[in-house]
Image: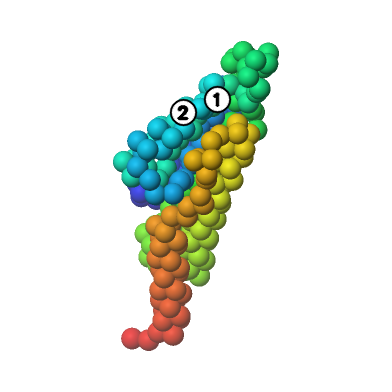
Amino acid sequence: MGWLPIVLYLAAGAFALWAIVAPLYQLTQPAATVTVNLAAEPSGSILAQVPGLPDGVTLAPTGSDGLTVNVTATTPPCDPGSSACTAAEQGAPLWLRFLSVLPTALWSAALAVISVLLARIVTSIARNEPFAPAQARRWTVIAGAILVASLGADTLTWATASLFVNQYQLPADLVPTAYYSYIPPALALIALTLAAAFRAGRTLAEDTEGLV
């Protein structure tokens, strides 16, 4: 086994560990930070339009385009003047803290699977078996892992943002919009193309086997 498969296996272990540790760690933290994708609008305008945020809730633009802001809650949702409003040590609701890190955990799990499969692909090639029957299946599974992680994480981000906004009754300017990145599906398409190429290579190798 060469050094590259070893590195990929180590990376897979790290990703798998983080997929487990990240949610558990987040549950011990008082704050919950969610990403809210908004309609196109300058960041400064977004921040200026929502001066009446609840105590313990803050906004921070993630880029100059103003399409995305991170919303952080460090206190539980409550009615002004109630005893719960002074219980800052309680932090954000447990379920919200858990949901806020699920997209990261999902991607970490997917990357662990992808790293293992890439290690096996590289190992098969190193053994002079580039068109082994499992190679095409591995690329197909990689494509599926990318799609599941991408669609799942983006959907969880939108759902968590919607729950956050409703839970804390944030101003109407903060309306979460579903956003799905086009880059992961493009990578999945490349993986499917490689699967087809390896499948064709396997067929060609079988057809020419024994020929001089």
Residue 199 in picture, x, y percent from top left = 46, 74
Q: Specify the quadrant of the image occupied by residue 181.
A: bottom left
Up the image or down, 24 lies above or below 114; here it is above
* Image point (45%, 46%), residue name: 38
Residue 80 in picture, x, y percent from top left = 63, 19
Residue 99 appears anywhere in the view: no
* Image point (68%, 13%), residue name: 83
Residue lying farthest right? 83
Between 35 and 112, the residue placed more toward the observer is: 35
Residue lying farthest left? 64
Q: CA distance from mark 1 to mark 2?
A: 9 Å
Residue 13 in picture, x, y percent from top left = 49, 40
Scheme by which the image is coloured: rainbow
**Which amino acid is tagged 2?**
Pro
Which mark is on residue 51? 2
**Which amino acid is tagged 1?**
Pro
Residue 119 in picture, x, y percent from top left = 43, 53
* Image point (41%, 68%), residue name: 194
Residue 196 appears anywhere in the view: yes
Between 174 and 105, the residue placed more toward the observer is: 174
| Total count of labels | 2
Up the image or down, 139 lies above or below 7; here it is below
Q: Specify the quadrant of the image occupied by residue 49.
A: top left
Q: Would you name the residue on which mark 1 appears?
A: 54
Between 136 and 55, the residue placed more toward the observer is: 55
